[in-house]
Image (cartoon, rainbow, N blue to C red):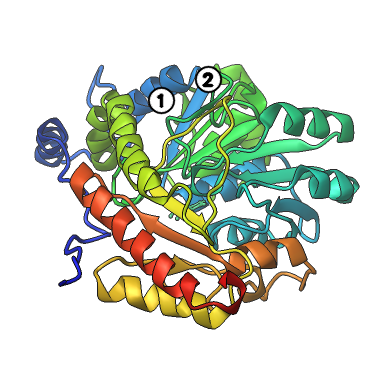
């Protein structure tokens, strides 16, 4: 029988909603793209987006910036990370996370990942004395036990910054992702849950931290034009002490984000429906494991991960090739060379080499695929079936399976 193939495109997002297209047109017609270029009485799209994002997350303050990576570096600067200072972060994440730490001349200290694809809290406890800041990446939408993590941070005087590039719209025990730490940072780059091509958002309840981040982002002395920033008094000293490291968002991006934010919860449910369709096909497949999802975690999964733990590298490579031949593009975190968006800690050679045996084992068998909303539920069922069939075929050939 002819094998079924998938023909969809794993990097094709949906068109932006019509309201976003119309809003973009209005900004372009106005010519006022810079966030501080407002007419008399006019509120800029960027300031409105900040006010709406603060309300969405329940944060006191919000700031829109040029990218998610810029948001991370700005948060690290705001909490006063210094050159040469160690900063804890996940061993399983993507390059902008250790990159943000390195951009300050600080030193990433990697914490192991568990088989549930979250930061290993035992390893975090062991390393907690080594740093005063944790840049926690909720990588691929997997959220660690935030109650235990917060208790650990409190006990060790650690300031938490959350990288929510993959958890916008998600919650832990009802608390929006990004609202546990001192600062939450998000990305609105095309492959994330809101799409403005490039972009980032920051939230906090701390007036001093937000005043610093507003100044860092390049507000000159125009901070009173913000709608989700602290009052002018918060800037009295900060405005003299804080360097301008320009990375503002512009009104065109903000204009296309506002209608998407309005629709975010509905989109999150659509992503999860696709995730569940793939998951249903991959439950109880011999040789394949999935991360456990705790009750407290209200996730948003715009991608899917599965593990082939302890498989020989050649067998994983064969699986990737066989799925690829049937149109299912898998990214392998155990590949010997960094490729596309995927790399792992040994590839980040600006950071000192660290011994991470548990992460190496998980990453060696970790496969990852995107689930854009352009895929139908039938597409996702087909993708799941193809992976199940090919995992079965390769696994049956392994000596350990006999
Ligand atoms: C885990 C993670 N954190 C942060 C970022 C940074 O986002 P941006 O691409 O907007 O700089 C990304 C982007 O891919 C990411 O995957």
Q: Which residue lies at the image location 23% right of the left edge and 34% below the top edge?
A: 255
* Residue 102 higher or lower than 251, as above or below: below
Q: Which residue lies at the image location 80% right of the left edge and 61% below the top edge?
A: 84
How far apart are the alpha carbons under marks 1 and 2?
8 Å
Q: Nearer the viewer, residue 112 or 110?
A: 112
Circle 1 is placed at which residue position? 53
User: Quadrant location of residue 4?
Assistant: bottom left
The answer to whether residue 236 is seen in the rendering is: no
Disc 1 packing (10 Å; few <14; some 14–19; many ≥20):
many
User: Quadrant location of residue 359?
Assistant: bottom right
Identify the disc placed on residue 330.
none
In the rendered image, residue 122, in percent from the top left (x then y), is placed at 82, 45
Q: Is residue 244 left or right of 169 when viewed as pictured?
A: right
Q: Secondary structure at mark 1?
A: helix
- Labels 1 & 2 near each other (Cβ < 8 A): yes
Q: Is residue 288 left or right of 128 when viewed as pictured?
A: left
Circle 2 is placed at which residue position? 59
In the rendered image, residue 273, in percent from the top left (x then y), is placed at 31, 35
Q: Secondary structure at mark 2?
A: loop
The answer to whether residue 349 is seen in the rendering is: yes
């Amino acid at each position: 029988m002819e094998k079924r193939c998938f023909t969809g495109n794993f990097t094709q997002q949906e068109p932006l909603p019509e309201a976003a297209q119309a809003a973009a047109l209005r900004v372009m017609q106005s010519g006022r793209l810079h966030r501080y270029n407002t007419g008399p009485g006019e509120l800029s799209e960027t300031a409105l987006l900040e006010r709406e994002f603060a309300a969405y997350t329940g944060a006191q303050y919000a700031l829109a910036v040029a990218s998610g990576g810029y948001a991370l570096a700005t948060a690290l600067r705001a909490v006063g990370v210094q050159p040469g200072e160690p900063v804890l972060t996940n061993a399983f994440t993507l390059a902008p996370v250790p990159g943000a730490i390195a951009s300050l001349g600080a030193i990433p200290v990697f914490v192991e990942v568990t088989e549930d694809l979250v930061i290993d809290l035992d390893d975090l406890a062991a390393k907690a004395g080594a740093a005063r800041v944790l840049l926690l990446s909720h990588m691929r939408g997997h959220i660690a036990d935030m109650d235990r993590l917060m208790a650990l941070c409190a006990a060790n005087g650690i300031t938490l910054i959350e990288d929510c590039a993959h958890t916008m719209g998600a919650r832990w025990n009802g608390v929006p992702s990004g609202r546990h730490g001192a600062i939450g940072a998000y990305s609105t780059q095309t492959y994330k849950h809101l799409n403005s091509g490039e972009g980032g958002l920051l939230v906090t309840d701390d007036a001093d931290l937000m005043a610093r981040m507003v100044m860092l982002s390049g507000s000159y002395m125009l901070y009173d034009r913000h709608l989700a920033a602290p009052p002018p008094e918060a800037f009295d000293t900060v405005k003299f002490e804080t360097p301008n490291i320009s990375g503002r968002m512009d009104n065109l991006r903000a204009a296309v984000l506002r209608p998407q934010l309005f629709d975010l919860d509905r989109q999150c449910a659509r992503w999860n429906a696709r995730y569940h369709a793939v998951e249903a096909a991959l439950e109880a497949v011999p040789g394949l494991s999935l991360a456990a999802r705790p009750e407290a975690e209200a996730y948003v999964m715009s991608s899917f991960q599965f593990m082939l733990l302890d498989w020989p590298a050649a067998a994983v490579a064969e699986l990737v090739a066989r799925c690829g031949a049937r149109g299912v593009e898998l990214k392998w975190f155990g590949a010997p060379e960094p490729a596309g968006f995927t790399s792992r800690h040994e590839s980040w050679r600006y950071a000192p080499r660290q011994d991470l045996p548990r992460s190496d084992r998980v990453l060696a068998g970790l496969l990852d695929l995107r689930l854009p909303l352009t895929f139908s539920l039938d597409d996702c069922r087909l993708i799941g079936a193809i992976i199940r069939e090919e995992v079965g075929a390769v696994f049956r050939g392994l000596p350990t399976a006999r």
